[in-house]
Image: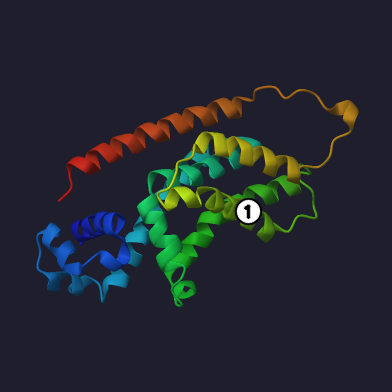
Amino acid sequence: MQEIMQVAAQVFRDKGYSEALTAQIAARAGVVEGTIYRYFPGKRDLLIRVVEQWYERILADYDQQLRVLQGTRARLRFLIWRHLTVIHNEPGMCRLIFNQLRAWPEYRRTTVFDLTREYTRRTLEIVQQAIDAGEFRADLPLRIVRDMIYGGVEHHTWVYLRGEGDFSPDTAADAMTELVYRGLACEQPASSQRPPRPAPAEVTLRRLEAVARRLEQSAGAKGGSARV
């Protein structure tokens, strides 16, 4: 079943949901088409399971890297940067989620919907912790903050997802983090404002991003050589 899902993920990425055929997936996986239906009732069920596994891998990476980051700004920037990077590196999968699954009337009843909420929950927790610590204003509507961040990322990357341009996750993450952080932070008296000093957390963040890039490049190289 795992090999079927790996092949299906690549076919869905390359062709999109409508053009991806279970017969193609079966042929690439080296099984008869009926084998797919032994594990999955239909093509949409197969897509949902592929996306579930994809989300689970990303969430595990989030948790591992957030554990070593300190400071609201660094943690917030990492989540914004990571979301931008996911879209930049996995446009095919993101198009499937944004255009295919979200538009499906049954989307809110799927595990993908639950995983999407889990995906954004980490950002809400960081904002809430900053509110509790007095770093961010207490009158913030958390759902609006979440929608502003993720909606802003998706709007910024929409042209890229349509195949009509490119963007820099690093540049976009810097600009978005600055806007979000300054917009949410409690105002400081002018006399207490000082030029910001480089924080150890920022150094750690940059190192994590470099490691993540190398891992993704390595995984992409292996995946490209192992296609069926």
Relative side of 44 to 7, left or right: right
- Residue drawn at (74%, 40%), measured in percent from left and top? 182
Q: Provide the secondary structure element on which disc 1 rests.
A: helix
The residue lying toward the viewer, choosing from 153 and 109, is 153
Residue 54 image position (x, y, % from top left) = 36, 54
Relative side of 190 to 150, left or right: right
Specify whether residue 188 is in view: yes
Q: Which residue is mark 1?
A: 124
The three-letter code of the residue at mark 1 reads Leu
Asked if residue 37 is positioned above or below residue 203 in the image, the reply reads: below
Residue 175 image position (x, y, % from top left) = 62, 37
Quarter assignment of residue 187:
top right
Residue 57 image position (x, y, % from top left) = 38, 50
- Residue drawn at (81%, 42%), measured in percent from left and top? 186
Residue 70 image position (x, y, % from top left) = 61, 35
Count neighbours of disc 1 (C-alpha within 10 A) and say few if under 14, some if 14 to 19, many if 20 or more: some
Q: Quadrant of the N terminus?
A: bottom left
